[in-house]
Amino acid sequence: MYISRQLKQQNIAEYLLYMWQVEDLVRANGCDLEKIKHNVVDAYPSLTAEQKKELVQWYEDLIGMMHDEGVMQKGHLQINKNIIVWLTDLHLRLLRSPKFPYYSAAYYKALPFIVELRAKGAGKDVPELETCFDAMYGVLMLKLQKKEISEGTRKAVQVIGDLLAMLAGYYIKDKKGELNLE
């Protein structure tokens, strides 16, 4: 919860990947609050009793949302899908603006990798940015499992990561009212 707050303010791309990881963590614990208390919350001995209580409540709320939205087994919470929608809107506005040629260049550099990922079966009906996040998340999971990542995948993720990092920076500026697209 504390990490998510900080990430949401500092880097929306990292925040989204973190929240996808939290969704999977909840699933890995069978969407069982007691298991999460034992396996997750208790793993933070430095938290005060009040902080642990807040963290448990946060997980309880997430479990409730996952249940209500039917994403207990797979999929993403609407709050996380909304981030993709917001980022897609910003992404399209940046591409239409002549003031951001570096962003357009980063996108067109990433586009062949996005097309390739979608051709390999990644959701063809999902926004391009979701494909990008799926790729980043997939590599994150491979790294956590200490599995090998091919050179081609490494290169693709670097290029896609550069695009998402740039978009995350513009997202912060846009939220602060500091982004002039006209």
Image: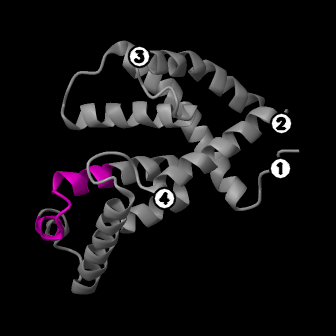
User: Residue 67 versus residue 57: which sits nearer the camera?
Assistant: 67
Answer above or below: position of 124 versus 48. above
Q: Residues within 10 Å of mark 4 (few under 14, many from 20)?
A: few
Q: Is residue 36 magenta?
A: yes
Q: Residues within 10 Å of mark 1 (few under 14, many from 20)?
A: few
User: Residue 160 versus residue 131: which sits nearer the camera?
Assistant: 131
Q: Which residue is mark 1?
A: 180
Q: Which residues are magenta?
A: 21-38
User: Residue visible at 39% across and 21% down?
Assistant: 154
Residue positioned most to the bottom:
50
Q: Position of residue 123 (x, y in %)?
A: 45, 29
Q: Which residue is mark 2?
A: 99
The span from disc 1 to disc 4 (Cα, nearest Å) is 26 Å
Q: Position of residue 67 (x, y in %)?
A: 31, 62
Q: How many marks?
A: 4
Badge 2 element:
loop
| Marker disc for residue 7 | none
Residue 32 vs residue 85: left or right?
left
Quadrant showing the N terminus: bottom left
Q: Earlier in the sequence, mark 2 or mark 1?
A: 2
The span from disc 2 to disc 1 (Cα, nearest Å) is 9 Å
The span from disc 3 to disc 1 (Cα, nearest Å) is 37 Å
Type of amino acid at the residue the image marks with label 2:
Lys
User: Residue visible at 50% across and 59% down?
Assistant: 8
User: Residue visible at 47% across and 26% down?
Assistant: 158
Type of amino acid at the residue the image marks with label 4:
Ile
